[in-house]
Amino acid sequence: MHKKIIAITTTALLLATACGCGSQQESDVATSKAPDINSQQSKPQKQTTTQTAQSFIDKFNGNSSIPITDTEKFTPSDPNGPHYRTEYRTGAFSDADALHGKLGQLSVDVLAYGAVLGYGENNMIRVYLNGTHTEIEEIFPIMAETLDPSISDQDIQSQMAKEYPNNDLVYAATHKLIEHAYIDGDMAFLDAKID
């Protein structure tokens, strides 16, 4: 009789444990399916702002009394295109957002570039200015400050005082975003990280 009571008690305990585990597993499954609203809201959402050639032009036009006008899209990597430059053959321009336009009498190309064949993102802005040296000297400071608001007027004027192409803005104490910039006669070139 004593063995019978132990067997019944053991069986009852096993059944109770099995039932308890089963309902616990079902509870865990139900809980894992329900979204945790609090944990989703507490995670910071990554904010990405994509600067395009047009958004840069809009920003520049807000800073300049001479706006960039008559813009037209172009494909930089097209070797037969009207605004093709040798450097556009590199992969960094394969997915570039590019606009050509007029800036007074100057010709201007603005490119948001950096993504390569769909990988990465366009995280750079490049600007080419072509025209008379006098007009370029007038526009260059505004263009530099639009690309890199941290740069000082003194550093810009120092760059413009050079008689040959160089990248002094890159080494300026106030520089944060500009990676290349120079004036060479009737052409200016500026290249900066997108902020």
Image (cartoon, rainbow, N blue to C red):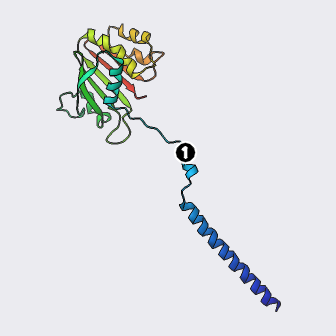
Q: Residue 180: x percent and y percent?
A: 37, 21
Q: Residue 36: x percent and y percent?
A: 56, 54
Residue 190 visible to an observer of this rendering = no
Q: Is residue 43 above or below residue 68?
A: below
Residue 57 visible to an observer of this rendering = yes
Q: In this view, does 104 lie above or below 192?
A: above
User: For the view shown, which residue lies furthest in the right direction?
Assistant: 2
Residue pictured at 29% horizontal, 26% vertical: 110
Indicate the quadrant where residue 192 lies.
top left
Q: What residue type is labelled 1?
A: Lys
Indicate the quadrant where residue 149 lies.
top left
Q: Give the residue at mark 1.
A: 43
Q: Residue 54: x percent and y percent?
A: 31, 29
User: For the view shown, which residue lies furthest in the bottom direction?
Assistant: 1
Indicate the quadrant where residue 53 lies.
top left
Q: Exactly how many numbered labels are in the figure?
A: 1
Q: Quadrant of the N terminus?
A: bottom right
Q: Nearer the viewer, residue 35 or 82?
A: 35
Q: In which quarter of the image is the C terminus?
A: top left
Q: Which of 98 and 158 is in front in this view?
A: 98
Q: Nearer the viewer, residue 53 or 120?
A: 53
Q: Residue 86: x percent and y percent?
A: 24, 28
Q: Is residue 88 above or below residue 38?
A: above
> Label 1: few (<14), some or many (≥20) within 10 Å?
few
At numbered mark 1, what does the secondary structure look like: helix, strand or loop?
loop
Residue pictured at 24% horizontal, 23% vertical: 69
Q: Nearer the viewer, residue 28 or 83?
A: 28
